[in-house]
Amino acid sequence: MTSRSSKVTARPSSEARAVARTQTLIKGQNGIGTVRKTTLPGGLRIVTETLPSVRSATFGIWAHVGSRDETPALNGATHYLEHLLFKGTHRRSALDISAALDAVGGEMNAFTAKEYTCYYARVLDTDLPLAIDVVCDMLTGSLIREEDVDVERGAILEEIAMTEDDPGDCVHDLFAHTMFGDNALGRPVLGTVDTVNALSADRIRRFYKKHYDPTHLVVACAGNIDHAKVVRQVRAAFEKAGAFRNLDVQPIAPRDGSRRIRTSGKVELLGRKTEQAHVVLGMPGLARTDDRRWAMGVLNTALGGGMSSRLFQEVREKRGLAYSVYSYTSGFADCGLFGVYAGCRPSQVHDVLKICRDELDHVAANGLTDDEIVRAIGQLQGSTVLGLEDTGALMNRIGKSELCWGEQMSVDDMLDRIAAVTPDEVRSVAGDILGQRPSLSVIGPLKDKQAARLHDAVA
């Protein structure tokens, strides 16, 4: 059993070194699952979770920058930069970076989202110092040379082409545009062919210097690790790179804002010669800090989160109209989305949309049954725990929690919060979210008469 703790243990410092602040955020049993946080002078936060029973460790650095921080002309710069940090530093070539982790059987990768970017490496616990040194070197010493920008441009354009060849993936970008329009949250994380071709090395360097300051970064590490050793190694790596230019600064706070999505009844169709039509029907959801997110999670699970969910049963099991059908939520700092995806034959689009719309309207008006809520709570609890069974997932949880919420919640607290969701809470959030007029995004080979009828689904 774990519990919260606010105990602060100030680490002593020499005259040459400013004081770091260390806190125990979650106190585990016999040291297992203990989460600690150290904030270094210079604003860098280091969060760790100890799991002595494993032989691995995952080390990651989270940057407080995503595609929503880009201007229209910079669309794709965050993802471009993610690629470039693997291309070489003052100490290592691109081959040196990859070979160092390959030589110990480690894994290294990165991902860019709309509100953050993460670089990480998973290694044996004995090789953690190597992973720390390599990843910190990448984040603090990237060269971003003109020739690397030119070479990587081709790889990114191929990645964009690969995404566009997968309509089941591309339709979610289209839905974001349908809901948010031509602003940062509505633009694709990868950028477009035009914006990627227009990005120069100089513009990317300026973007790098602005957003990769230590105050914008969170270091997260989970596994068979020692917090104090991780702090010492990270601090040494950042000091070696001269990254701490100002010691008298504080980390930036989690994002906030007051964005409201007002889109309703909008339809976007992208004609493609595909075998299936890919559709997303949805509406504005909840921000990730909204207290109703727990009830929303239960609602989403019951609607389209598994084989026993309403949408799966009605669309696939009973009628065989689609192979893949599910619902999902996306929460941002100040707003969110709820969507229902289905892939089906073009001739079945209107039947599938009618069934989905009828189910959403029914749940908005009447809520879920008690049995559905109990089953969804159990499913959500189980998937939460099972999704944290490796050090990579633990690193993601503590890193994202620090960056996005500025606090940590133990697994037991999460399970308790899910279990505490009531039918009234689910009914209330269903009315608020599903009661809105939906919007629709479709990719497929629909004929003119079929396309004209799409507005019926959101009327």
Image (spheres, rainbow, N blue to C red):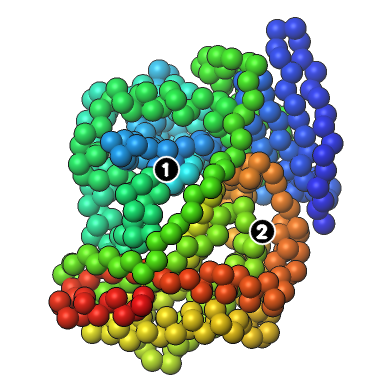
Give the residue furthest to the top: 15
Q: Position of residue 71 (x, y in %)?
A: 34, 37
Q: Residues within 10 Å of mark 2 (few under 14, many from 20)?
A: few
Amino acid bearing label 2: Asp
At horizontal 63% and vertical 16% (from top left) the residue drawn is 247
User: On the picture, is 143 further left or further right than 38?
Assistant: left
Q: CA distance from mark 1 to mark 2?
A: 23 Å
User: On the picture, is 429 further left or further right than 204?
Assistant: right
Q: Nearer the viewer, residue 207 or 85?
A: 207
Q: Which residue has dot 2 on it?
A: 291
Q: Quadrant of the C terminus?
A: bottom left
Q: Position of residue 5 (x, y in %)?
A: 83, 43
Vertical relation: 203 (above or below) 401 = above
Vertical relation: 311 (above or below) 94 = below
Q: Which mark is residue 68?
A: 1
Residue 24: name its quadrant: top right
Does the image show residue 128? no
Give the mark, 1 or 2, whose residue is nearer the N terminus.
1
At horizontal 57% and vertical 27% (from top left) the residue drawn is 215
